[in-house]
Protein backbone atom coordinates (compact mmCIF):
# COMPACT_ATOMS: atom_id res chain seq x y z
CA UNK A 1 0.00 0.00 0.00
CA UNK A 2 2.86 2.40 0.81
CA UNK A 3 4.35 1.78 -2.63
CA UNK A 4 1.07 2.67 -4.32
CA UNK A 5 0.77 5.87 -2.30
CA UNK A 6 4.39 6.78 -3.09
CA UNK A 7 3.84 6.18 -6.81
CA UNK A 8 0.63 8.24 -6.82
CA UNK A 9 2.33 11.05 -4.93
CA UNK A 10 5.24 11.02 -7.39
CA UNK A 11 2.86 11.32 -10.37
CA UNK A 12 0.96 14.11 -8.62
CA UNK A 13 4.14 16.08 -7.91
CA UNK A 14 5.40 15.55 -11.48
CA UNK A 15 2.04 16.77 -12.80
CA UNK A 16 2.28 19.93 -10.72
CA UNK A 17 5.87 20.49 -11.86
CA UNK A 18 4.87 20.08 -15.53
CA UNK A 19 1.96 22.50 -15.11
CA UNK A 20 4.25 25.07 -13.47
CA UNK A 21 6.84 24.65 -16.25
CA UNK A 22 4.14 25.21 -18.90
CA UNK A 23 3.00 28.37 -17.10
CA UNK A 24 6.55 29.74 -17.03
CA UNK A 25 7.15 28.83 -20.69
CA UNK A 26 3.94 30.62 -21.66
CA UNK A 27 5.02 33.72 -19.73
CA UNK A 28 8.42 33.66 -21.43
CA UNK A 29 6.81 33.28 -24.88
CA UNK A 30 4.49 36.19 -24.13
CA UNK A 31 7.49 38.32 -23.11
CA UNK A 32 9.38 37.29 -26.24
CA UNK A 33 6.36 38.54 -28.22
CA UNK A 34 6.34 41.87 -26.37
CA UNK A 35 10.07 42.35 -27.03
CA UNK A 36 10.22 41.30 -30.68
CA UNK A 37 9.93 43.71 -33.60
CA UNK A 38 8.06 42.56 -36.66
CA UNK A 39 7.91 44.55 -39.91
CA UNK A 40 5.69 47.65 -39.64
CA UNK A 41 3.06 46.21 -41.98
CA UNK A 42 2.48 43.31 -39.53
CA UNK A 43 2.00 45.50 -36.44
CA UNK A 44 -1.64 46.32 -37.18
CA UNK A 45 -2.64 42.67 -37.46
CA UNK A 46 -3.34 40.08 -34.81
CA UNK A 47 -0.32 38.35 -33.34
CA UNK A 48 -0.60 34.60 -33.94
CA UNK A 49 1.21 32.06 -31.78
CA UNK A 50 1.07 28.43 -32.90
CA UNK A 51 2.01 25.62 -30.54
CA UNK A 52 3.10 22.22 -31.80
CA UNK A 53 3.07 19.34 -29.34
CA UNK A 54 2.41 20.81 -25.91
CA UNK A 55 -1.20 21.02 -24.71
CA UNK A 56 -0.25 22.56 -21.36
CA UNK A 57 1.49 25.49 -23.05
CA UNK A 58 -1.54 25.99 -25.33
CA UNK A 59 -3.78 26.17 -22.26
CA UNK A 60 -1.53 28.67 -20.47
CA UNK A 61 -1.08 30.88 -23.54
CA UNK A 62 -4.83 30.82 -24.20
CA UNK A 63 -5.46 31.98 -20.64
CA UNK A 64 -2.98 34.85 -21.09
CA UNK A 65 -4.44 35.83 -24.47
CA UNK A 66 -7.90 36.27 -22.92
CA UNK A 67 -6.73 39.27 -20.93
CA UNK A 68 -3.50 40.50 -22.52
CA UNK A 69 -2.51 41.74 -25.93
CA UNK A 70 0.91 42.58 -27.30
CA UNK A 71 0.95 46.32 -27.75
CA UNK A 72 -2.21 47.04 -29.72
CA UNK A 73 -2.28 43.56 -31.24
CA UNK A 74 -4.78 40.94 -30.13
CA UNK A 75 -3.09 37.57 -29.49
CA UNK A 76 -4.48 34.46 -31.21
CA UNK A 77 -3.36 31.01 -30.03
CA UNK A 78 -3.45 28.08 -32.44
CA UNK A 79 -2.44 24.48 -32.06
CA UNK A 80 -0.97 22.21 -34.75
CA UNK A 81 -0.34 18.48 -34.58
CA UNK A 82 2.81 18.68 -36.69
CA UNK A 83 5.09 21.25 -38.32
CA UNK A 84 3.53 20.68 -41.74
CA UNK A 85 0.11 21.75 -40.34
CA UNK A 86 1.25 25.26 -39.35
CA UNK A 87 -0.48 28.21 -40.98
CA UNK A 88 0.91 31.77 -40.98
CA UNK A 89 2.19 32.54 -37.49
CA UNK A 90 4.26 35.22 -35.83
CA UNK A 91 5.63 32.82 -33.21
CA UNK A 92 5.81 29.04 -33.37
CA UNK A 93 6.51 27.08 -30.22
CA UNK A 94 7.79 23.56 -30.92
CA UNK A 95 7.34 21.41 -27.83
CA UNK A 96 10.11 19.10 -26.68
CA UNK A 97 8.23 15.97 -27.81
CA UNK A 98 8.12 17.32 -31.39
CA UNK A 99 11.69 18.66 -31.54
CA UNK A 100 12.59 16.13 -34.25
CA UNK A 101 10.44 18.26 -36.62
CA UNK A 102 12.64 21.35 -36.27
CA UNK A 103 14.48 20.89 -39.59
CA UNK A 104 11.24 20.70 -41.56
CA UNK A 105 9.78 23.64 -39.61
CA UNK A 106 12.82 25.87 -40.22
CA UNK A 107 12.75 25.02 -43.94
CA UNK A 108 9.01 25.71 -44.20
CA UNK A 109 9.33 29.05 -42.36
CA UNK A 110 12.52 30.24 -44.14
CA UNK A 111 10.77 33.06 -46.02
CA UNK A 112 8.41 34.03 -43.18
CA UNK A 113 8.90 36.59 -40.42
CA UNK A 114 8.41 33.99 -37.69
CA UNK A 115 10.07 33.61 -34.29
CA UNK A 116 10.75 29.90 -33.67
CA UNK A 117 10.89 28.91 -30.00
CA UNK A 118 11.70 25.34 -28.94
CA UNK A 119 11.10 23.45 -25.73
CA UNK A 120 14.41 21.58 -25.83
CA UNK A 121 17.94 22.74 -25.08
CA UNK A 122 20.49 23.07 -27.86
CA UNK A 123 18.22 23.61 -30.86
CA UNK A 124 19.48 27.07 -31.83
CA UNK A 125 22.34 25.33 -33.65
CA UNK A 126 19.68 23.62 -35.80
CA UNK A 127 17.83 26.82 -36.69
CA UNK A 128 15.66 27.70 -33.69
CA UNK A 129 15.68 31.31 -32.57
CA UNK A 130 15.19 30.51 -28.89
CA UNK A 131 15.44 27.19 -27.01
CA UNK A 132 14.27 26.63 -23.46
CA UNK A 133 16.72 25.18 -20.97
CA UNK A 134 15.57 23.62 -17.71
CA UNK A 135 18.35 22.90 -15.24
CA UNK A 136 17.99 22.31 -11.54
CA UNK A 137 14.28 23.14 -11.68
CA UNK A 138 14.95 26.59 -13.15
CA UNK A 139 13.81 27.68 -16.59
CA UNK A 140 16.09 29.72 -18.81
CA UNK A 141 16.71 29.98 -22.53
CA UNK A 142 19.34 29.99 -25.22
CA UNK A 143 18.99 32.63 -27.92
CA UNK A 144 20.45 33.07 -31.39
CA UNK A 145 20.33 36.69 -32.54
CA UNK A 146 21.75 35.59 -35.94
CA UNK A 147 18.85 33.19 -36.49
CA UNK A 148 16.38 35.89 -35.42
CA UNK A 149 17.89 38.36 -37.91
CA UNK A 150 17.82 35.66 -40.59
CA UNK A 151 14.04 35.51 -40.05
CA UNK A 152 13.79 39.28 -40.59
CA UNK A 153 13.07 40.05 -36.94
CA UNK A 154 14.82 41.75 -34.06
CA UNK A 155 14.50 41.32 -30.32
CA UNK A 156 15.32 43.77 -27.57
CA UNK A 157 18.76 43.74 -26.03
CA UNK A 158 17.07 42.94 -22.72
CA UNK A 159 15.84 39.58 -24.07
CA UNK A 160 19.27 38.77 -25.48
CA UNK A 161 21.05 39.65 -22.24
CA UNK A 162 18.70 37.59 -20.05
CA UNK A 163 19.27 34.43 -22.08
CA UNK A 164 22.41 32.59 -23.08
CA UNK A 165 23.63 33.94 -26.42
CA UNK A 166 24.71 30.94 -28.51
CA UNK A 167 26.05 32.80 -31.55
Image (spheres, grey):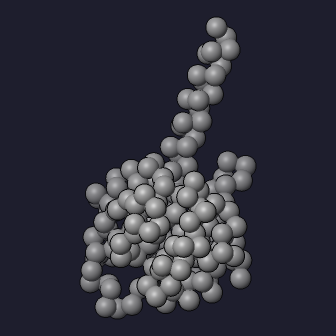
Q: The N terminus lies in which quarter of the figure?
A: top right
Residue 48: x, y in percent? 35, 71
Question: Does residue 60 show up?
Answer: no
So how many labels did they put on this image? 0
In the picture, measured across the screen, residue 94 lies left or right of residue 163, that is left
- In the image, is residue 111 above or below residue 72? below
In the picture, measured across the screen, residue 106 lies left or right of residue 64, that is right
In the picture, measured across the screen, residue 71 lies left or right of residue 126, that is left
Q: Residue at x 55, y 29 (%)?
A: 12
Q: Please identify the residue farthest to the top as the structure is shown.
A: 1
Q: Looking at the image, which is closer to me, 155 or 80?
A: 80
In the picture, measured across the screen, residue 54 lies left or right of residue 101, that is left
Residue 117: x, y in percent? 54, 69
Q: Looking at the image, which is closer to me, 68 or 112?
A: 112
Q: The C terminus lies in which quarter of the figure?
A: bottom right
Residue 103: x, y in percent? 59, 73
Q: Residue at x 45, y 48 (%)?
A: 56
Q: Residue at x 54, y 77 (%)?
A: 106
The image quarter in which residue 122 lies: bottom right
Q: Residue at x 44, y 69 (%)?
A: 84
Residue 134: x, y in percent? 67, 55
- In the image, is residue 23 above or below residue 37? above
- In the image, is residue 134 above or below residue 125? above
Question: Does residue 57 show up?
Answer: yes
Amino acid sequence: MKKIIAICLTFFICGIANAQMAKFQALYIYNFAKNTSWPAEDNSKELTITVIGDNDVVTELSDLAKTKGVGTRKVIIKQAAASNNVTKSDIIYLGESKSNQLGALVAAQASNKTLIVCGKKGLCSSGADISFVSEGGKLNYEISPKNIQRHGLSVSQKIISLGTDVD
